[in-house]
Image (spheres, rainbow, N blue to C red):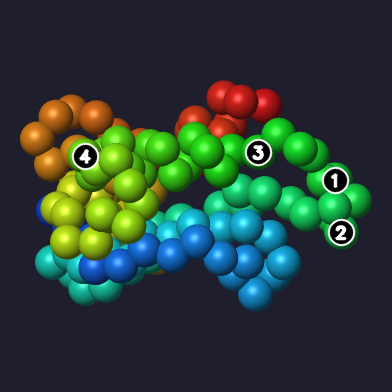
Amino acid sequence: MENIKTMNAIIESVSINDDDRGLLTAYLHLKHEDGNQGFGGYSLYLPKTYTHHQLMSCAGHFIWRCMEIAGVDSWEKLPGKTIRVKAEYSKIHEIGNIINNDWFNPALDFKEQK
């Protein structure tokens, strides 16, 4: 994690879908000074076809925190918003509010839930 760089980013688009794997995922498609990158891809919900299906999921937390970081009250309002990112070449680790010191790191938040 030595190569992590903090940069401003623009949310260009958003998506919530099955990610071609049959599980619910959400993405923010971002543009920052080093190029374009996606933030998300976490398994937010496993359908009943998965042996370790659970009714409880982290989907609400992920979606809520992304909206909260960008300062919007609707997922559809995310495109065009400016946020901050902590990223390296292969991955965005955290997103943050452009003004406030409020950061969202799904790996840390979801780890705390277990």
Q: Any mark on residue 32, and which?
A: none
Q: Residues within 10 Å of mark 4 (few under 14, many from 20)?
A: some
Q: Residue at x 17, y 61 (%)?
A: 80
Of labels 4 and 1, the one closer to you: 4
Q: Residue at x 27, y 55 (%)?
A: 78
Label 4 sits on residue: 71
**Mark 1 residue element:** loop
Residue 57 visible in the snapshot: yes
Q: Residues within 10 Å of mark 3 (few under 14, many from 20)?
A: some
Q: How many marks?
A: 4
**Mark 2 residue element:** loop
Q: Any mark on residue 52, and which?
A: 1
The tag earlier along the polypeptide, 3 or 4, is 3
For the residue pair 34 and 77, the one nearer the viewer reads as 77
For the residue pair 7 and 57, the one nearer the viewer reads as 57
Q: Any mark on residue 57, and which?
A: 3
How far apart marks 2 and 1 lie (CA) works out to 9 Å
Q: Residue at x 65, y 75 (%)?
A: 20
**Mark 4 residue element:** loop
The tag earlier along the polypeptide, 3 or 2, is 2
The tag earlier along the polypeptide, 4 or 2, is 2
Check the image and report above or below for 19 versus 66: below
How far apart marks 1 and 3 lie (CA) works out to 12 Å
How far apart marks 3 and 4 lie (CA) works out to 23 Å
Q: Amino acid at mark 4?
A: Gly
Circle 4/circle 1 CB separation < 8 Å: no
